[in-house]
Amino acid sequence: MTATSNILPLFVGISLAGAFLTSIVGKKLKWLPDLMGSLTTLILLGLSLITVRIVATQGILVYSVGGWKLPIGIALVLDGLTVFMLVTVNLMAFFIAIYSINYMEKFTSKWKFYTLFLLMVAGMNGVVITGDMFNLFVFLEIASVASYALVAFGTERHELEAAFKYTVMSIVGSLFVLLGIVFLYSYTSTLNMADMANILAQKSASNITIMVSVLFIMGFGLKAALVPFHAWLPDAHPSAPAPISAMLSGVLIKSLGVYTLCRVFYNVIGINSSLSLILMVLGTLSMVIGVFLAIGQWDFKRLLAYHSISQIGYVILGIGLGTPLGMIGGLFHLFNHSVFKSLLFLNSGAVEYATGTRDLQKMGGLMTKMPITGTTSLVASMSIAGIPPFNGFWSKLIIIIACVQANRLGYAFWAVLASILTLASFMKVMKYAFFGKLREKWNKVEEVPVFMKLSMVILALICVVGGVLLIYNINEVFLKPASDVLLEGTKYADIVFKGIQ
Amino acid sequence: MIIYLLCLILFCCGLYCILRKRNIIKIILGIIIAEYAVNLFFILVAYRMEGRSPILSSEVEIVNMVDPLPQALVLTAIVIGLATTTLLVALAMRIYEKYKTFDITKIKELRG
Amino acid sequence: MSKEHDKGMSLIVKVITRLTVGLILLFGIYIVLHGHVSPGGGFAGGVIIALSFVHLMLAYGKDVALKKLPKTAMSFFESMGAILFLSIALLGFTGGYFFLNFISKGEPFRLFSAGTIPLSNIAISLKVGAGLFAIFVVLVLLKFEWEKKE
């Protein structure tokens, strides 16, 4: 325990403090919620960038809350994967908070929005940083409850219907997770993840671990919207306000679904060939079915939501492969997807802000009136479709190469096919929304306000230079530690126990 | 053992209610039943034969007490359940305001 | 007095409520303050405190209850409870750890013991009491669009 590890509880503390201060003071002072939202997420982003350096120099950090010794108290663990997710979550949260300054003007009570938004950020940071099984469930629920309310934020017919569907399905998912935790607790008599991994490794494999694995695949798979459990996503994500769609698609399904799946299966239960096969099959199914469903859509945001399912499939496929290259590819794609999918949702929000419609057939020629939205959207579309200089290309390439190396040519074929279909559907978006002839009624359309432009441009820049992350030095401190954590598997326990001293 | 099976049956009743019923209020009730089945299961897992409640007091020395941790955890789970149930009820009221019905077969404007 | 009789339930309910509601509130406060030495605590006590206001509202109608605890006060107390709890946790940094019980623990089974736990209980009861009553009020007072027109 060193002085620097005091940074760990701040990730939850600062975001919660921001949320509740906004709800007290924000009602009176109109300008305050905007400031609180941006400032809190900026501080969190700064802290998460500091942790990159801390982990690179000092290795893994373990913090015991309240000074209780490790297996008894709640532990917070900062390792490579945690740092990677913290940077992803807080980077997106910051730019989306900036974007919402202008976008949320049309809603009446901004302070409610920012309170829920910061609660969601607190939940996601908590899920990522905790080293305790039940604590993970609590933070998962904090983030989920905030997101249910945010999906219904507009309180119109469609929002309410989508939010109800999302809430019911997500609660069932949470119940499966809780049931899995109950089984694990009764089997191992501990809740600390590292301790649990130790005990599970000592006891030989039993039916309990299989049962728990199935429950966790259902629960976390539902949160991650893998294909048999995806039905809520195409309704919920388009119905939310655009910044929240970006947040849900960009980071929520990743930190609540993909991260938890990785952490539980690789570091606690321990991966085996059948589990890895299940993950790969689910990933490929999501990848292909998601993109097929996406092609036929005419609603801009609904199309993007189906692509989220498809791209999460890539991430799960890469991580499920289990090879070092596959891990790096999967995690890199996770980061890239959160950048370009957030950007695309922000673009769709900008188009809706300016024109008031989400129907692709009613748009056309908007590039001339909204050059910045059009250009950033073009960049993001090329990224998601995997056109060479952009970041999406590199991560997809790595995943496909990893598939070929591991002698899984079938999966590689489906990955390439899904990528081509993605390209096709985004060519449709570009053609109908931004290129072509400008319609009469859009003659008075204006470019969106300054803060929206700012965050879109910066995210587009990250898309362009995203491939830089693969350069040796940056890869060493950012991506590689994250995939190393997963590759170490259940040795995670020993490392955590070593970190406490 | 039989009591765990009864718990499982209760959970399945809740799931059946969520999947099969058409009325929004009945779906919410199904969620509550399933939630309480899980909570009950958690409490039962912590029970031991002839155990008594884990409350320390100055007069009585406790020799054989049940595991106190799941009780604390279930309290947390109940609070979370309260929050989600409230949100669902509020959503249901709003849905009734817009659609003037609780029947989910008539509330399906989103598809495709 | 006569104005109070117009709304709410019958005279018998009102008289009984007037006699019991204070005791319920007091019992809630007792549960909160003794949370660290006996069963109960912030959540249970907070629920009982909220129920005393709910009781008042059921018997006398919304105006009397909301005069005792207006909506703005409710949301203020709710956020204040959360912030108090968080600041107790952050004050633990004075001893080096988040959530550290930095006050002396005292003697077991006494009212003034267990360090920060009674303080946390009070913060939680504020949050839960105000929050639960706010939920009740919001659900009861929700006006549908077609009701507003009438």
Image (cartoon, rainbow, N blue to C red):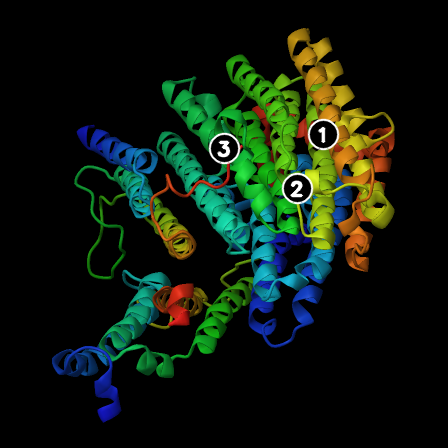
Q: Are marks 3 and 2 on the same chain?
A: yes
Q: CA distance from mark 3 to mark 2?
A: 21 Å
Residue A430, percent from left and from top = 78, 35
| Foreground label between 1 and 3 | 3
What's the mark number on residue A231?
Answer: 3
**Secondary element at tag 1:** helix
Q: Are marks 1 and 2 on the same chain?
A: yes
Disc 3 crowd rating (10 Å Cα; few below 14, some 14-19, many 20+) is some
Which of the two residues, A64 or A259, is positioned nearer the viewer here?
Answer: A259
Residue at the spot of label 2:
A359
Residue at the spot of label 1:
A333
For residue A49, say whether it is visible.
Answer: yes
Which of the two residues, A464 or B62, is positioned nearer the viewer here?
Answer: A464
Disc 1 crowd rating (10 Å Cα; few below 14, some 14-19, many 20+) is many
Q: Chain ID for label 2?
A: A
| Foreground label between 3 and 2 | 2
**Secondary element at tag 3:** loop
Which of the two residues, A29 or A195, is positioned nearer the viewer here?
Answer: A29
Residue displayed at 15% across by 79% down? C10
Q: Which residue reaches farthest left?
A: C12
Contact, mark 1 vs mark 2 (Cβ under 8 Å): no
Disc 2 crowd rating (10 Å Cα; few below 14, some 14-19, many 20+) is some
Q: Chain ID for label 1?
A: A
Q: CA distance from mark 1 to mark 3?
A: 23 Å
Q: Is residue A184 left or right of residue A131?
A: left
Q: CA distance from mark 1 to mark 2?
A: 28 Å
Residue type at mark 1 is His
Q: How many marks?
A: 3
